[in-house]
Amino acid sequence: MERRALFGGKTLPYMLLLPQFAIVVVFFYFPAGQAVWQSLLMEDAFGISTEFVWFENYQLLAVNPEYYKTMTTTAVFSFLVAFLSLSCGLLLAVMADKQIKGATIYKTMLIWPYAVAPAVAGVLWLFMFQPSLGMLAKMLRSWGIDWNPLLNGNHAMILVVLAATWKQISYNFLFFLAGLAAIPKSVIEAAAIDGAKPMRRFWTIIFPLLSPTAFFLLVINIVYVFFDTFGIIDSVTGGGPAGNTITMVYKVYQDGKSGANLGSSAAQSVVLMVIVIALTAVQFKFIERKVQY
Amino acid sequence: MASVVLEAVRKVYAGGVEAVKGLSLTIPNGSFTVLLGPSGCGKSTLLRMIAGLEEISGGTVTIGSKKVNDVEPSDRDIAMVFQNYALYPHMSVYDNMAYGLRNRGTAKEEIERRVAEAARMLAIEPYLQRKPRALSGGQRQRVAMGRAIVREPAAFLFDEPLSNLDAKLRVQMRLEIRKLHNRLKATSIFVTHDQVEAMTLADQVVVMNSGKIEQTGTPLEIYRRPASIFVATFIGSPAMNLFPGTIEAPGKVRLADGTSFAYDANVFDAKIGAKVEIGLRPEDAKAGTAVPGRPKLAWEVTEELGATRLLHGTLAGSSFVLAMPADIDTPAHEIALETTPGTIHIFDPESGRSLRRA
């Protein structure tokens, strides 16, 4: 006997899908389509006339050495932030998972940074490492390190990496902690009885069982470093010194907003979109296969 | 293989709760010992202390000739089978079984040989390449046992391993565990709350109650000569009948309604005039001829169990169950109970201990 409710006609299913569809169209496909369309146009310097130029914006990007530098910067920045925030989050979660006094307070404190807005987080780190005022900068200088993120590109990079990592650790920590809590205690006890020492237990039992969580976080973190770190870079370095901390998303903003070169900016955002989609697809294709159990 | 000796072992939790209260026990080399008791009696805690998963608050635990109080679980040379199997979900059955050997650096050929042998013994050869989630409950249980067997440890610990299986499979696995033990002769400690498992599996049953040992003995000793009211009522189904009485003369105990039972005064040491608790198993009495002074059961309800029939009623004001063969016609509503002196148990109502002579 057919137990499902059946509706005649094809209108109703579409009607039911419509609200969701409308939201996606308005907030995703429409802006994305506009970006693609914009990337095929070129405006004159005063924004008076617009010309359809096919792929000239992309061609110009392809021969722009500055754009390749941005890509390298983004790659370094993304790798460092994703790696550091994932590994620190995991380390802290493993520590917090142990039965210790005051664990709840410890956990709560670790979650707080996530509630801080990116720009505020940026300013916080900016002050701490400001060469002439910052506490930590003074300490570094007293150790004889000529710390100056305002002039030294590497120092500036370290600073934005620290700020972006600090902000993301909480999020990773929270998910890793939940992942650890989901591992049955008896499985770990069984491994202990089976002769595995703590480190071996971690790498052969706990880490593989955490891998679905780690994979999910990797995808989220990649998206985070590519897009959401904009606020931190804007407030800490503004892309400087000498363009050393300009990431791809920051260049999209600079060229479009400050440089008023909408065509190139749109082309860059399309490139960025393609890269993130490609990265995510690669992750799903190759890494996800390994985390199944 | 080794014996396991516990001396005045205590477990006090952080909140001050004393789960195990100074308990001494010897588990001889090669014996199958069952820790039996209701939930919360401390039997699992005791097992986990032997395994090294719980810290020992006092006393000593010795495995073989080595005191293991401060030895890590990994170095105690024991294997444990958990209630929920605790298989490694991301490893194949083969890897699950090989894991403990690899951790100890056993040679590859030796691992292969031992896993193959255990798999054959447990009939899980076809599943070696499968992941645990693709196995049924009974198969997972076998893998968990295989993981323990390949290690060839000094002692096997079982923490209620059958309670997640359905009734039919439980009976089957129970038998297989016993067969396996007969074959391997490895020291085994088995925790359960199921008296049938305890009776069928054990060489030695340790009945525990609120952190202490009530009685240690073979299954038949525990059943025939219970050392306390707790053991008497915990073992046997339906439970032993208990009712108050007074010692009238050596070998004669009077019930509340003036009738009396004969007991063996050579076995039980009770003063004349003492108030006692009388114990009588449902299957140890039968319907006899009405003789003046013989206790009478007034029954109200019958339960058919197939081979036996249970009659529920009252005897001298206390509730009483009588088990009788189902092929005998149910007698009238009053039954004169006929017993032999050897089946009457006498307990001290204050301490709950049996008054059996030492």
Image (cartoon, rainbow, N blue to C red):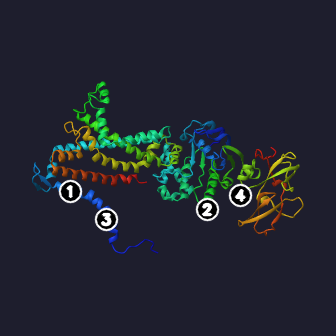
Determine which residue is flagged by label 3: A18
Q: Read off the residue under disc 4.
A: B237
Disc 4 to disc 1, how far (Cα)? 79 Å
Residue A224 % position (x, y): 31, 47
C-alpha gap between disc 2 and disc 1? 67 Å
* C-alpha distance separating marks 3 and 1: 22 Å
Q: Say left or right for A189 vs A87.
A: right
- How packed mark 1 is, by other alpha carbons closer than 10 Å (few <14, some 14-19, many 20 or more), is few
Residue that badge 1 annotates: A34
The residue positioned 44% from the left and 49% from the top of the image is A209
The answer for which chain carries disc 4 is B
Q: Which residue is mark 2?
A: B168
* Same subunit: marks 3 and 2: no
Estimate the x, y position of residue B8 in percent, counting from the top left: 67, 37
Determine crowd level at label 4: few under 14, some 14-19, many 20+ residues with C-alpha closer than 10 A.
few
Query: At label 3, which amino acid type do we have?
Result: Leu
Between disc 3 and disc 2, the foreground one is 3
Tag shown at residue A110: none
Q: CA distance from mark 3 to mark 4?
A: 65 Å
